[in-house]
Amino acid sequence: MTDIEYRLPQRLELRTDLPGPASVALAARRAAVVAAGVSSTAPVFAADADGGVIVDVDGNSLIDLGSGIAVTSVGASDAKVAAAVAAQAAHFTHTCFMITPYEGYVAVAERLVALTPGHHEKRVVLFNSGAEAVENAVKVARLATGRQAVVAFDHAYHGRTNLTMALTAKSMPYKQNFGPFAPEVYRMPMSYPFRDQPGLTGVEAAQRAIGMIEKQIGAQSLAAIVLEPIQGEGGFIVPAPGFLPTLVAWARENGVVFIADEVQTGFARTGNWFASEDEGIVPDLITLAKGIAGGMPLSAVVGRADLLDAVHPGGLGGTYGGNPVACAAALATLDRMAEYDLPGRAAALGARAKQTLTDLAADVPAIGDVRGRGLMLAVEFVGADGITPDAALTKAVAARCLEQGVLVLTCGTYGNVIRLLPPLVIAEETLDEGLAILVDTIRALAGAQAEV
Ligand SMILES: Cc1ncc(COP(=O)(O)O)c(CNCCCC(=O)O)c1O
């Protein structure tokens, strides 16, 4: 693997309690002006970040195993990305591509056409957030097919706008009391191998969903299927082999647009450029965001030219979509990902990390499942019966890791999943140190639980 140079020491160093005094003071200022609906995992405020560490305003250096939710794959201050951002901003920060276009947008589109699965003619539209990309992919599918119905799956997460809330499965905290939600969205059962009845194959799980689609909606009324190749917020659910290809084949046979939502799985996270490749599927449309631009807000819909070009001129856009500074960051980010071979790095580091967690699971009954690919890994916690979700233990593990200076995130429909999303440029030693603290914490807390 490529040696990576870092600007900050890639170490865990705690100088104060967490939060330290400067974070406490900032928290008081925050409480006076920031809406209570915006919550934060860490009780500290960032002052600097690089590679696999975040330094807070009190000088504490934390190990970051979250990447700001799978965003800072190349780190939060990569030198090439920072230079590209500064250079672009010194020329122009915005002209609005719908008013005065610029090369950066076109160059990003060219890279995405070349990088994404499939050798068919493609088109690209750029936006700002993942939800915006998903919204627009559904718009395109509905216009191009003349149909209205959209299928999403159990445990899905697609965003916080009205349509993407309708597509998202979990009510609290994403949807509760925010309705009514967009109509013509139907939810189908997912392939969730750890929780499906034993022996349900991916093909059988797909056929179960297809049967329900044909009975409840009718293929001729269905515009699109929207699915994350590995479900993120819902719990890093990796469908059984065969699930995705069976759904894609059925969609193709019935003129249904298959939208792969790779906002969280995309850009080397799972050990390939895109998780769709892991399953050998070629989506009709693919939604992208998060890792695309080194932390700058940028998202995209990439896919079949006949679908995207079916839209009338002016039908797609938005003021900031494909902002030039974000596009400059994206080009530098994609260069870095190739230079460092981040798909290969994610696969290699992820395999080692997954083995560490799998070995741990053999000793810890509270771990019901270890799953994921590349550096998108998850540990699902269960009770003594081996299946009842244990959200309390999950929360305690994450909190205890944070007290020790390791930032891990949780997720899952049942809140019982610890997920690992480290920056893909994290130093091996830093990842090993963070993993060791996570392992020791799980042993201590799960072991204590087992003795109760
Ligand atoms: C698959 C998938 N599609 C779409 C989205 C939405 O992307 P935006 O950029 O947050 O709008 C996501 C965002 N996931 C993290 C959201 C966290 C939170 O808001 O609490 C995703 O994972």
Image (spheres, helix red, strand yellow):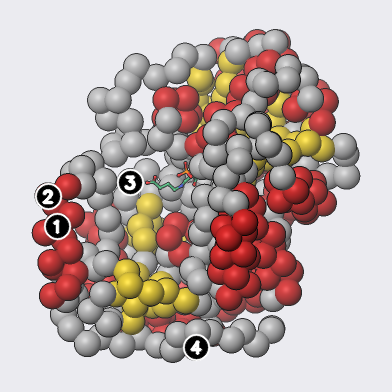
Q: Nearer the viewer, mark 4 or mark 2?
A: 2
Of pointers 3 and 2, the one earlier in the residue sequence: 2
Q: Amino acid at mark 2?
A: Ala
Q: CA distance from mark 4 to mark 2?
A: 40 Å
Drawn side of residue 209 relative to residue 357, left or right: right
Q: Position of residue 167 (x, y in %)?
A: 48, 29
Q: Are marks 4 and 2 in contact (CB under 8 Å)?
A: no
Q: Are marks 3 and 2 in contact (CB under 8 Å)?
A: no
Q: In whole angstroms, how far apart are the C-alphas of marks 3 and 4?
A: 32 Å
Mark 1 and mark 3: Cα distance apart in space = 33 Å
Q: Quadrant of the C terminus?
A: bottom left
Q: Disc 4 or 1, which lies upstream in sequence?
A: 1
Relative to residue 304, is residue 9 depicted above or below?
below
**Residue linked to disc 2:** 32
| Residue at image mark 1 | 29
Q: Residue furthest front?
A: 91
Could you tell me the amino acid type at mark 1?
Arg
